[in-house]
Amino acid sequence: MNMHITPYEFGNINNVPESRVRKLLLSRREINKWESKIKEQGYTIVPLSVYTKKRLVKVEIALAKGKKLHDKRETLKRKDIDRNLKKIQKDFLR
């Protein structure tokens, strides 16, 4: 749902709409399993890659779990340290 695919610019009048509903090629059992994990366990579906194969557009998807609070703090701390190091390097090279 809601995936925008730009139409082929050298195409003709038979181009498909840019943001139409597209099929998810999974079995009913797989869809139910993913749906239950998303609702109960806090997982989310993340697109890993989007590519074309012949006339089809394919998306590799995965189930991912969000970070815990302490993991987020660690990531923010690491970003802050890296930012400070780059600033020091920049000042040192002047």
Image (tube, rainbow, N blue to C red):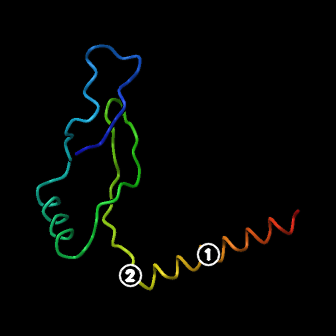
| Coordinates of residue 68 in the picture (x, y in percent) | 38, 81
Amino acid type at image mark 2: Lys
- Judge by depth and name the residue closer to the eye, 68 or 88: 88
Which label belongs to residue 45?
Answer: none
* Horizontal side of residue 33 vs 46, given as left or right: left
Q: Quadrant of the C terminus?
A: bottom right
Q: Quadrant of the N terminus?
A: top left
Q: Residue at x 52, y 82 (%)?
A: 74
Q: Residues within 10 Å of mark 2 (few under 14, many from 20)?
A: few
Judging by the rendered image, the residue that carries numbered circle 2 is 68
| Coordinates of residue 36 in the picture (x, y in percent) | 15, 69
Which label belongs to residue 80?
Answer: 1
| Coordinates of residue 84 in the picture (x, y in percent) | 70, 74
Amino acid type at image mark 1: Asp
Quarter assignment of residue 18: top left
Quarter assignment of residue 58: top left
- Judge by depth and name the residue closer to the eye, 89 or 43: 89
* Horizontal side of residue 69 vs 34, given as left or right: right
Q: Is residue 74 above or below residue 21?
A: below
Q: Is residue 94 above or below residue 41?
A: above
Q: Earlier in the sequence, mark 1 or mark 2?
A: 2
| Coordinates of residue 88 in the picture (x, y in percent) | 78, 72
